[in-house]
Amino acid sequence: MQIPTPGVRPRDRVGVAQGRHMDNKHRTAAMLAAAFVIAGSDVAAAPSAPAPAPASAPAPAMSDDALAHAYVGWVGRILEVPTTSDFDQPLRDAMATMVTEHLARLKTLVPAWIAEERARGGPALSDASVSRAIHNRLVNEMALWRLESPGADYDAVLTRAILRPTVCVTGVRSSYMGLLMDWFQAVPAADRPTLLAGERTLLAHWGTHRTALAARPVPSLADDEAAEIMRLRSGEAKPDVAMPPFLADNVFKAEPETLATRCALHQWGLARALRGGAAPGAALLSWRYASLKPVDDWTDPATVAAGGAPADYPRVAQIWAVTGSVDVRVAADAQGRYASARVATRHVVVPGVTDNPPVAFETVFDAASLKAAPQRFIPLKAGADGVMPRAAVMRIDWKLQ
């Protein structure tokens, strides 16, 4: 049985005052590597180039029952509840019960998803394609889980927890659930049932069609953060919300980003949005989109570095067989020449993700599209009235040949 391991990008190797802690992806990779034999020879080729085994997913050389069992085990390791003494026992017990209930749900859902893929793809569908589709669906479900809101009461309590000064400096937890538990433990005991009930509601949504999912905000929280940092660096502005000292050191000394500083950056961005008058729900939505884990975070960087994608095609998109197009809005100068560009809309197709927006994959073509825009842009010409257009929208297609 072949189980490739999820990868860890260098920026996630975070040292804290208490020593170096293993983040979720390190720990998951280590646990899977210890539990399964790693090999890499029997994965079907992608349409245009030989594809390595999906880096975060069970490989296809197994029965559908075994594949389902492996995927449920993979999610179980991702959702492992920390047992360290800094979490109180009632919280650990409540979270462990919640995860056990969710894994029992997945033991029904994942086989059903595999059957759906078999029925949709027909006899010609390869085992590798089934494995890739289930991986994609699970990664997207994890993103949807952190993106959705179960209600205003939950959101209000969660916002207060996220904004607690100590949340981002307590160290890197060894499980995906660790930060959740930090938030839950940061609130008064009377508020904890609201968060636990909300999480149960969100986990119960896995495998369902989300009918009221809010779109990605424009500009994003990350865009706002970057613009404000540029103003602060230039001396043109004074901070409306003070940065924590360790975040300011990271930002203004250009030190490598860590999980803790990424957490603090978005915490600061959320505080700024609320201070600036943003509606609480809208501000929290921006924070959720900024904080969700994209497919890049579930892909082995060594596999990405190995190459094999068509020229300029994003490697992560090729590994997971993602296709689509991006509409780029280009601003032109007074002579109609390219000046700048931004992503306007995305149309992304992801194997296995058919019933909900592919939120974990939506931005996979953004950087490549913005890089391609200057080369593909055709200078604008004045209209019959002699007026030079100052903007145009161009579509950049991403298709595996």
Image: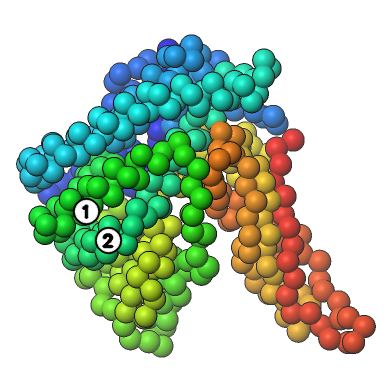
Amino acid residing under circle 2: Asp
Disc 2 is placed on an element classified as helix
Instruction: Indicate which disc, 2 or 1, sits on the residue closer to the N terminus.
Output: 2
Left or right of residue 148: residue 324: right
Secondary element at tag 1? helix
The quadrant where residue 125 appears = top right
What colouring does the structure picture have? rainbow
Q: Residue at x 62, y 21 (%)?
A: 119
- Coordinates of residue 379 in the picture (x, y in percent): 81, 71
Q: Quadrant of residue 39?
A: top left
For the C terminus, give its image quadrant. Answer: top right
Figure check: 300 above or below 197: above
Q: Are marks 2 and 1 in contact (CB under 8 Å)?
A: yes
For the residue marked with disc 1, what is the amino acid?
Thr
Instruction: Look at mark 1 in the image and give the residue it sits on.
Output: 194
Residue corresponding to mark 2:
153
Left/right placement of residue 135 relative to residue 317 reads: left
Within-10-Å neighbours for mark 2: few <14, some 14–19, many 20+: few
- Give me the residue at 64% from left, 25% from top: 120
Examine the rendered structure and indicate whether residue 239 appears above or below residue 257. Answer: below
